[in-house]
Image (cartoon, rainbow, N blue to C red):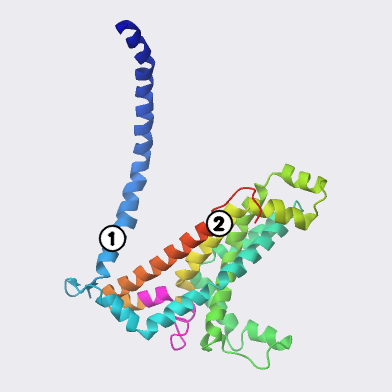
Amino acid sequence: MRGSRALSLAPARSLAGPRLRTTLTAYLFLAPALVLLGAFTFAPLAFGTLLAFADYNVLAPPRWVGAENFRTLARDPAFWVALRNSLRYLLVVPAIQVAALALALLVNRRLPGITLFRAAYYVPVITSFAVAGLMWNWMYAQHGVVNWVGLRLGLLARPFDWLNHPTLALYAVMLVTFWKGIGYYMVLYLAGLQAVPQELLEAARVDGAGRVQAFLLVTLPLLRPTLLLCTLLSTLAAVKVFEEVYVMTGGGPFGQTTTALLYVYQKAFQEFRFGLAAAAGLFVAALGLGLSLLYVRLFREGGLRPW
């Protein structure tokens, strides 16, 4: 009996060694990335969270003030204006998703020279914010291209100073975000469309489905993970928008284009109120996390199930 038990345990012992080595090798490859994440993501996040409860201006050591920074934020009208502008900026999310998906459907064809169109739509993505901001500043000027085209087409009665208009300035910057990001999401949707099995589309057509029905019943459900990814990325980008606003308006006129992240920048690096800036940054991070969880919940049912 003792001998047979030893024989029955022998294969398990022989497998334990390779399995342990495989596990250790996997963790060994994961360890450098985890160290970098800890050093450049989790540690600053923990430090920023602690700083949100302190008064710190670089010149003196941090002083614990509890929830005073959050009470200051609640009383600051400029913070609520900045938060309202960030929430208003979310209007660009559905517009850019619909346009990017439509563009991906158009370029997902086997036509001569279609690669040139795909590359052309992606050029704004690789254009730096500084160059894009300067270019659109020139286009939005009173004697710029936008006013010239609007006047020639009869859409405008007089030229506008778009970036200095209290109501229109934010929407003018949103248009730049739309122009710059549409190529990025088009590429993601194009990859999703090319992963859709053609057999399913052909089967739907054999069953009598038209192009619109095949898109709604087959393509769109299979694109649900891509829709979740693109919606999530564009929402987070809208909540923490900074570069376009900073380059084009600097938050003006009269703070009407100041977004939440620009408010954080102003408090930290112009007023040196790092504790207050950290509290505002924590609020923006919580807002982004809440919206992300909401989207994941809305899109969590994947696969072939209809909408």
- Look at label 1 and name its amino acid: Ala
- In percent of width and height, residue 237 lies at 49, 66
Callout 1: SS: helix
Q: Give 115 or 186, whichever is nearer the viewer.
A: 186
Callout 2 environment at 10 Å: few (<14), some (14 to 19), or many (20+)?
A: some
Residue at 35% of width from left, 28% of height from top? Answer: 21
Residue located beneath label 1 in the image: 46
Query: Which residue is rendered at x = 54% and y = 66% of the image?
Result: 127
Residue at the spot of label 2: 299
The stretch drawn in magenta includes residue 123: no
In the rendering, at what x and y percent does residue 106 appear? 72, 59
Please give the range of residues in magenta.
Answer: 248-264
Relative depth, front residue between 101 and 110: 101
Residue 108 visible in this rendered orientation of the protein:
no
Is residue 246 depicted above or below 306 in this figure?
Answer: below
Q: Determine which quarter of the picture holds residue 102.
A: bottom right
Using the image, determine if residue 224 lies above or below residue 131: above
